[in-house]
Image (cartoon, helix red, strand yellow):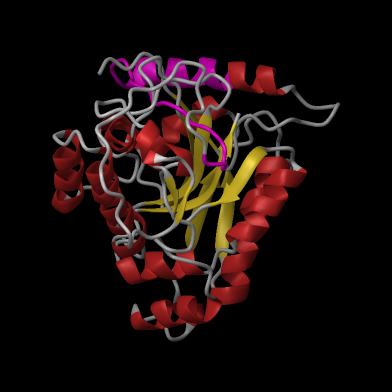
């Protein structure tokens, strides 16, 4: 599939409507797009991009152009999560959803430096994930005028996958379990946890702007529920932030993935470009995850592909915990 454009917007959100004294959404989007393009041109080859999806109400199609109707298949009865988009409306090819300009979907998530302590240990990553209240994150996002905000414990937008897996797959908010994870990782005394830095970018609003507010909320949760102190470092402009991400091994960082492609949106495309090549800031590498994506790409039955993608989500966000999804949204 030829990917024509990718916007990876850092920080907790992209497309926020600012106050009257701040930049407009279109101005911020244009600024972010220009900066990312410049950084990618300097650091990497041409970058691919991903695609979007609809809202939370099941319906025949979210696009103005009808999608292909695959051969009817028996729906699995024991899948986790809740139906958000009927599989009967998915194509039996890749991409399985057509492009819809009215529903540009995104996911905001946190990433780890997976190769160095303390986040090279899965139990530590699980602890940090279980200590985050996504409901509170979503409430802040709504106050900041984000559209169609949903708390997330998995990576794929619910209407790209066809199911909302929130709290059924991934690491749910559970402070007691979070402390248990940390203790199992060897940190029975939280004060012994090493000094940790969470890097952010101001993206048009110097600290304590709205992006800093979100980082500050998350750091407070880690302090309250785990007893660990995490320092926030504002790297300033987006260009400096991306330069740092691509030339360093950050302990904790945040990104937003906004899917935009004329080829439509599909889990195959999203997973491959989010967790391979220059976009894989954490250097996540897992043969089982790659195998699941490869298997799904060779299957035409959407229901069988969906099962494999759910397995991939469980591995990515629950077993390995390469990222901490926070919210899904649309633009």
- Using the image, determine if residue 146 lies above or below residue 127: above
Q: Residue at x 68, y 28 (%)?
A: 204
Q: Nearer the viewer, residue 207 or 132?
A: 132
Along the viewing direction, whichever of 230 and 261 lies nearer the viewer? 261
In the drawing, does residue 2 fall left or right of residue 154?
left
Q: Is residue 205 visible?
A: yes
Image position of 224 with respect to 297: above or below: below
Measured as percent of width and height from the top left, residue 76 is found at: 29, 55
Along the line of sight, which residue is nearer the eye, 319 or 197?
319
| Residue 227 in sight in this render | no
Residue furthest bottom in the image: 188
Determine whether 71 is above or below 43 in the image: below
Region rendered in magenta = 31-58
Instruction: Count how many numbered circles sit on residues in the image.
Output: 0
Q: Residue at x 40, y 77 (%)?
A: 181
- Position of 163 compared to 74: left or right? right
Location of residue 163 with respect to 86 vertically, above or below: below
Q: Quadrant of residue 264?
A: top left
Q: Nearer the viewer, residue 170 or 84?
A: 84
Q: Quadrant of the C terminus?
A: top right
Q: Residue at x 44, y 70 (%)?
A: 127
Seen in the image, is 279 located left or right of residue 61? left
Q: Position of residue 254 (x, y in %)?
A: 50, 44
- Residue pictured at 34% horizontal, 34% vertical: 270
Residue 169 magenta: no
Q: Residue furthest right?
A: 20
Which of the 4 image quadrants contains residue 14?
top right
Q: Is residue 56 magenta?
A: yes
The image position of residue 17, as x and y in percent, is 73, 30
x, y percent for residue 210: 71, 42
Query: Which quadrant: the N terminus?
Result: top left
């Amino acid at each position: 599939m030829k990917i024509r454009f990718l916007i990876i917007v850092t920080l907790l959100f992209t497309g926020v409507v600012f106050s009257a004294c701040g930049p407009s959404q279109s101005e911020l989007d244009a600024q972010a797009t220009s900066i990312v393009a410049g950084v990618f041109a300097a650091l990497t080859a041409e970058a691919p991009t991903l695609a979007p999806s609809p809202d939370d109400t099941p319906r025949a199609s979210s696009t103005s152009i009808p999608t292909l109707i695959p051969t009817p298949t028996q729906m699995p009865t024991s899948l986790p999560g809740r139906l958000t988009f009927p599989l009967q409306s998915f194509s039996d090819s890749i991409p399985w959803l057509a492009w819809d300009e009215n529903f540009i979907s995104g996911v905001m998530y946190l990433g780890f430096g997976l190769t160095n302590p303390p986040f090279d240990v899965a139990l530590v990553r699980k602890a940090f994930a279980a200590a985050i209240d996504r409901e509170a994150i979503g409430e802040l996002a709504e106050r900041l005028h984000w559209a169609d905000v949903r708390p997330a414990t998995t990576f794929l937008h619910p209407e790209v996958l066809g199911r909302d897996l929130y709290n059924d797959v991934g690491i749910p908010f559970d402070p007691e379990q979070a402390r248990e994870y940390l203790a199992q990782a060897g940190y029975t005394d939280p004060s012994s946890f090493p000094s940790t830095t969470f890097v952010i970018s101001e993206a048009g609003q110097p600290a304590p702007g709205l992006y800093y507010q979100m980082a500050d909320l998350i750091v407070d949760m880690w302090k309250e529920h785990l007893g660990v102190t995490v320092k926030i470092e504002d790297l300033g402009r987006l260009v400096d932030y991306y330069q740092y991400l691509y030339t360093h091994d950050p302990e904790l960082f945040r990104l937003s993935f906004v899917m935009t492609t004329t080829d439509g949106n599909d889990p195959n495309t999203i997973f491959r470009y989010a967790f391979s090549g220059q976009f894989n800031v954490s250097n996540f590498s897992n043969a089982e995850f790659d195998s699941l994506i490869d298997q799904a790409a060779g299957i035409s039955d959407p229901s069988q592909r969906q099962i494999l993608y759910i397995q991939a989500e469980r591995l990515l966000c629950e077993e390995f915990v390469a990222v901490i999804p926070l919210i899904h949204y649309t633009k």
